Amino acid sequence: MRILGIETSCDETAAAVVDGDGSVLSNVISSQVPIHARYGGVVPELASRNHLMSMIPVIQQALDDAETTLDGIDRVAVTRGPGLIGALMVGVQAAKSIARTRNLPLVPVHHTEAHITAVLLRGGDLAAAPPELPYIALAVSGGHSSIYHVLGVGRYRRMGTTLDDAAGEAFDKVARLLGLSYPGGVSIQNLGRHGDRTRFVLPRGMRRKGNLDFSFSGLKTATRILLESLGALDDVTRADLAASFQEAVVDSLVTKTLAAASRVGVKDIVVAGGVAANERLREHFTEACDAAELRLHLTAMPYCTDNAAMIAGLARFLEPVDSALLDGLEPFASGELGEAVLADGEAS
Ligand code: KG4
Ligand code: ZN
């Protein structure tokens, strides 16, 4: 089985072809970063327009790279949400058109679910053993910071989530305070690479033992106040500030994810989403999981930030939408994945 995946939830127009065993045959991403960078963030209307222009060439490129045509495709998968509604609409309409005209089954996919199952993709440099169920997954992106107890595909218990900003959003906002370019995560990582991460002690939110929720807005404010109190910054101080901010985010993410694993007694940890590309996060998780004798599954770098291979890969395990309901299939802007669980493990 060959699946064509389409992803347009934010500012990447992406298409990919994935085989039935999870092998990635092609993975094409047309980034709109240069278009949005001068505004310091994604402008939804510009994102929709650019998806419209890029969608067909990107799909064509994904088919070409996989050395196939639509004749060789057995199902279509598309991100249905959450994301920017106008941006999602472009991908969903493209997928519906292909499914309708080629008489192919269509699988709508939850974006966060695709992030936390991207570790199941195979082939190429993806040689590592897949995680054993159940596992703990941390999904950290521009829109989400959540910890899931993954019992199986489609069976997610949400153990913690962000109460305000997502981790990636905090990176992006603090980068803007520091006058760095969008997207902020990579800019802060690069600036902080040789900085002293211990120089400034910034707050770690929601530290009460047993609480697995995140909060990054206090950290963002503390960084802003510190920045204002420091006045004009020299290059060393800027790098130390970036490294110290990054450390505070990473520390919260690692500590709470390991606490979740310990609470439910699982040994496998998956780290996914755009922020999972962060090199300090990867290093800290590796050290902490080694020390705690946990098996760590870091999403491979090409599949951390938004891509369509993860959308097609997840669609292997899901049921297509009934063809009678295809015309009514609409994208959704928000919607958490899975059932929330309270601190004592009871469903809310
Ligand atoms: O998963 P993603 O591509 O899109 C969403 O679903 O939101 O994540 C994008 C987020 C942005 O906030 C970006 O700043 C962050 O991921 N990001 C990083 C890094 N690369 C991307 N954050 C920290 N370090 C990175 N290396
Ligand atoms: Zn994403």
Image (cartoon, rainbow, N blue to C red):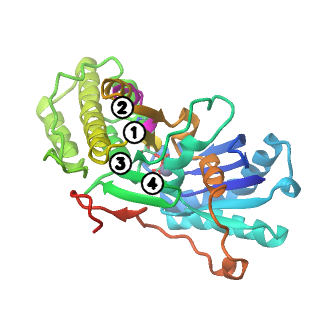
Asked which secondary structure carries label 4, the reply is: strand
- Comparing marks 1 and 3, which lies closer to the viewer? 3
Gap between marks 2 and 1, in whole Å?
Answer: 6 Å
Q: Could you tell me which residue is drawn at 47 percent across and 60 percent down?
A: 155
Asked which secondary structure carries label 1, the reply is: helix
For disc 4, the neighbor class at 10 Å (few under 14, some 14 to 19, many from 20) is: some
In the depicted structure, whether residue 197 falls above or below residue 120: above
Q: Earlier in the sequence, mark 2 or mark 3?
A: 3
Gap between marks 4 and 3, in whole Å?
Answer: 28 Å
In the depicted structure, whether residue 194 falls above or below residue 208: above
Asked which secondary structure carries label 2, the reply is: helix
- Asked if marks 2 and 1 touch (Cβ < 8 Å), the reply is yes
Tell me the amino acid under the disc marked 2: Ile
Q: Main secondary structure of the magenta part?
A: helix
- Asked if marks 2 and 3 touch (Cβ < 8 Å), the reply is no
Camera sees residue 24: yes
* In magenta stretch: residue 50: no
**Residue 71 appears left or right of 209:** right
Asked which secondary structure carries label 3, the reply is: helix
Camera sees residue 35: no
Q: Earlier in the sequence, mark 1 or mark 3?
A: 3
Q: Earlier in the sequence, mark 4 or mark 3?
A: 4
Residue 103 in percent (x, y) is at: 82, 70
Quadrant in the picture for the C terminus: bottom left
Tell me the amino acid under the disc marked 1: Gly
Compare residues 57 and 18 and report the one nearer the observer.
18
**Residue 45 appears left or right of 75:** left
Residue highlighted by disc 1? 184
Tell me the amino acid under the disc marked 3: Glu
Residue highlighted by disc 4? 151
